[in-house]
Amino acid sequence: MARPSRQPLKRLLDLLLRRYAEGQAAALAPLVVGRRVLDVGAGEGYLGAALSRRVGVRVCSVDVGGFGRAGGLYVVSDGARLPFPAMAFDTTLIVLTLHHCEDPERVLAEAVRITRARLLVVESVWRDGRDLFWLRLLDGPVNRLRHDGAMAPATGFRRAEQWERLFDAHALGCLERRWLGSRWERLVHHPRLWALQV
């Protein structure tokens, strides 16, 4: 018996990802500094495209695989070794990415190296066992559907204060921190934004 096609589900997920990227762009746009932006862990590149439309910045997207669907400059690279010179970008985005990294400390250090002014980090954080349960339950299946298993599994979920200790270790000044998403989104997913000064 043939397996049912996953294409309708993938199309629906793609539509939701585009919409989610628009909301992220609206939240991040006022915090972007300069015209040169790097999006580390860009996935399809929808966030970079939405930011470009919203504030006219030039975005380069980077991820570990050729996942780009939004057009624009897209580089395939391991985030632990970014192929850019020091301070090549005014603002760097690391959105829902660090929890997928084998060595998030190294990825953050590389982002700091190539960023001149502002680092914007958004991470799924957990506050109690229920939050962690939902993150572990949903993240893997959604990302397998997105990239047919090519994305590293999420194994590094942390509490907000654990991420903040990492930022402090890199001497990053926190300009702003806040929750993102609607009240309904935060029932199962708690994205936390940090605007960091490099």
Image (spheres, rainbow, N blue to C red):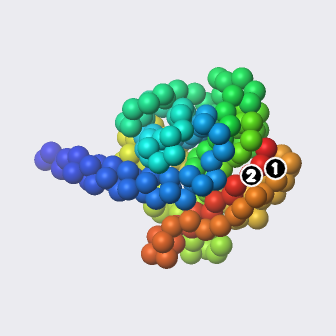
Viewer can see residue 132? no
**Left or right: 141 as drawn, with respect to 108:** left
Which label belongs to residue 196?
2
Would you place residue 27 above or below residue 146 in this image?
Answer: below
Residue 19 position by quadrant: bottom left
Horizontal and vertical percent for residue 122? Answer: 61, 55
Look at the picture and state if 74 lies above or below 13: above
> Are discs 2 and 1 less than 8 Å apart at CB?
yes
Image coords of residue 60 (percent x, y): 54, 32
Q: Which mark is residue 172?
A: 1
In this image, 16 relative to 32: left or right? left
Percent x, y of residue 17: 39, 52
The answer to whether 24 appears left or right of 3 in the picture is: right
Dot 2, crowdedness within 10 Å: few (<14), some or many (≥20)? Answer: many
| Nearest to N terminus: mark 2 or mark 1 | 1
Mark 1 secondary-structure assignment? loop
For the point 49% across and 76% down, the residue is 183
The circle drawn on residue 185 is: none
Q: Tell me the kind of residue under disc 2.
A: Leu
